[in-house]
Amino acid sequence: MAGLNAIEGAALVIGGIYMLVMGLLGRPDSPQQAEMGGLTLIALGLIPLFAARGLLLRRSWSRGPALITQIIALPVAWTLLRSHGVLIPAGVVLAAMSLTALYQLARPATIEALGIRRPGAEPDTDTDA
């Protein structure tokens, strides 16, 4: 689950760096738009990367950004699936990764491993030693 978030984050950062470099060194129609798009992708890529690190360290805060990343990825996957050519397999992969990660993030075992309590649940006071 952390790995899926890390892969998505890395893909966004790499895409952002590519757009930024092409905006600076290439000949885009709008260099400012390419540069801002690249910086935006880099910033968006940091969110799943931080979430992946938090998931690896079993930090409860990391589940929220990871869930949001996967929910946002689903419409992107749908758009890719409705396109033509090489983007269709990319949409299939993204959809499969997002749905797998969402399933893993919603599992009770994951919630317990991250130390997330349900609202109104009593804290664990197991004092048997």
Image (cartoon, rainbow, N blue to C red):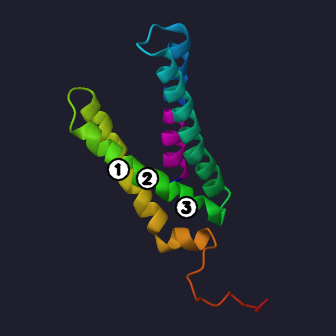
Label annotation for residue 16: none
Above or below, comparing residue 51 to residue 83 in the picture:
below
Q: Which residue is drawn at 45% across and 7% down?
A: 27
Q: Residue at x 39, y 47 (%)?
A: 73
Label 2: how many residues lie within 10 Å, few (<14), some (14-19) or many (20+)? many
Between 27 and 118, the one nearer to me in the picture: 27
Between marks 2 and 3, how big is the CA–CA gap?
10 Å
Verify whether residue 125 appears in magenta.
no
Residue 49 rendering spot, x and y as whole percentages? 59, 44
User: Residue tagged by mark 1?
Assistant: 74
Between 90 and 72, the one nearer to me in the picture: 72
Q: Could you tell me which secondary element the residue under label 3 belongs to?
A: helix
Q: Which residue is drawn at 46% across and 69% down?
A: 107
Confirm or deny contact between disc 1 and disc 2 (CB under 8 A).
Answer: yes
Q: What type is the residue that disc 3 sits on? A: Gly
Residue 100 rendering spot, x and y as whole percentages? 39, 55
Q: Could you tell me which secondary element the residue under label 2 belongs to?
A: helix
Q: What type is the residue that disc 1 sits on? A: Leu
Q: Could you tell me which secondary element the residue under label 1 belongs to?
A: helix
Counting residues from the N terminus, which is met first, the one under dot 1 or under dot 3? 3
Q: Which residue is drawn at 48% across and 21% down?
A: 34
User: Residue tagged by mark 2?
Assistant: 70
Verify whether residue 6 appears in magenta.
yes
The reply, left or right, for residue 124 in relation to residue 81 is right
Residue 24 rendering spot, x and y as whole percentages? 56, 12
Residue 116 rendering spot, x and y as whole percentages? 60, 74
Q: What type is the residue that disc 2 sits on? A: Gln
Between marks 1 and 2, how big is the CA–CA gap?
7 Å
Q: Give the quarter of the figure containing the C terminus.
A: bottom right
User: Residue tagged by mark 3?
Assistant: 64
Above or below, comparing residue 30 to residue 124 in the picture:
above
The reply, left or right, for residue 119 in relation to residue 88 is right
